[in-house]
Image (cartoon, rainbow, N blue to C red):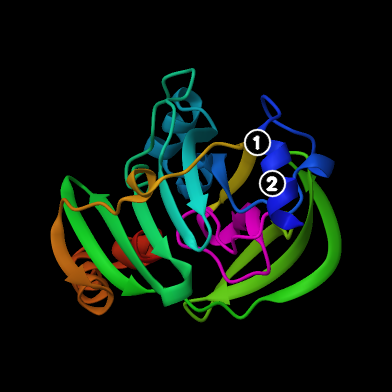
Amino acid sequence: MRTFIYFITLLLPGILPAQQQQFITRGKIEYERKTNQHAFMEEGSVWDEAAKKNMPKFVTYYYDLTFSGHRTLFQTGRDPEVKQMKFWGLFESDNTIATQLDSNSSVTQRTIFGDIYLVADSLRHIDWKITTEIRKIAGFDCRKAVGRVMDSVVVIAFYTDDIVTPGGPESFNGLPGMILGLAIPRLHTTWYATKLQLVEVTDKDLVAPKKGKKMTGDSYRSEIKKVLKQWGEEGAKRQFQFLL
């Protein structure tokens, strides 16, 4: 029955209303990521106060999550319509993450101040607490869940079980369906799906990145902490941007 419903949805053009998207197992989701860059600027700093007047409060990027079954590929999408000035030190925008949900593994390509890292790691474990709150995102009714990572970083997610693949933006997953909305207050950043395209997905569409300095998850985290330690207090504040 699920196969039949999915076959019917593929015959329909464009972006479909949620009631026609039951049991979706493959496709492409666009996410809009917005970061409040003013929140990273120090209150009272003459330079930062001047920067606030010349830089937009929010910086926006777009990403595509291609998925099929238990495989996903998250990568940079279309360019923003308006060129944006970005405050120094904000985390980079061009991560590419290939995830194998059924084998608990991922390959992440990260660019940090010009250096490219290729990190093979297990999936991040998040202890989610699912709530009763519902929010509509991209035409889907999504249930709220709250989790915590790195001991103290709170993550808020909204997922739909209409999309079977239990993935999400960046490296977040582990809920009974696809995460269409994500917020990390510590990073003053949100990711929200803007649309779903019911497209055919082949193995070529899910190829993991290959360029970069190859590292395990543990060695990457150790190296980043070592680099940021040289920045002193400022580095300590920035570490979550590069380790989440």
| Badge number at residue 242 | none
Q: Position of residue 119 (x, y in %)?
A: 25, 65
- Three-letter amino acid code at the position of disc 1: Leu
Instruction: Please tell me whether mark 2 sits on a helix, a strand or a loop.
Output: helix
Residue 94 included in the magenta stretch of the image: no
Which residue occupies the extreme left position in the image? 213
Q: Examine the rendered structure and indicate whether residue 55 appears above or below residue 135.
A: above
Q: Answer yes or no: do the residues labelled 1 and 2 have beta carbons within 8 Å?
A: yes
- Three-letter amino acid code at the position of disc 2: Tyr
Q: Position of residue 128 (x, y in %)?
A: 66, 76
| Badge number at residue 10 | 1
Question: Label 2 neighbourhood size at 10 Å, few (<14), some (14-19), many (20+)?
Answer: some
Q: Position of residue 60 (x, y in %)?
A: 51, 33
Left or right of 146: which side holds 52? Answer: left
Question: Label 1 neighbourhood size at 10 Å, few (<14), some (14-19), many (20+)?
Answer: some
Distance Cα–Cα, label 1 vs label 2: 6 Å
Residue at 59% of width from left, 60% of height from top?
Answer: 165
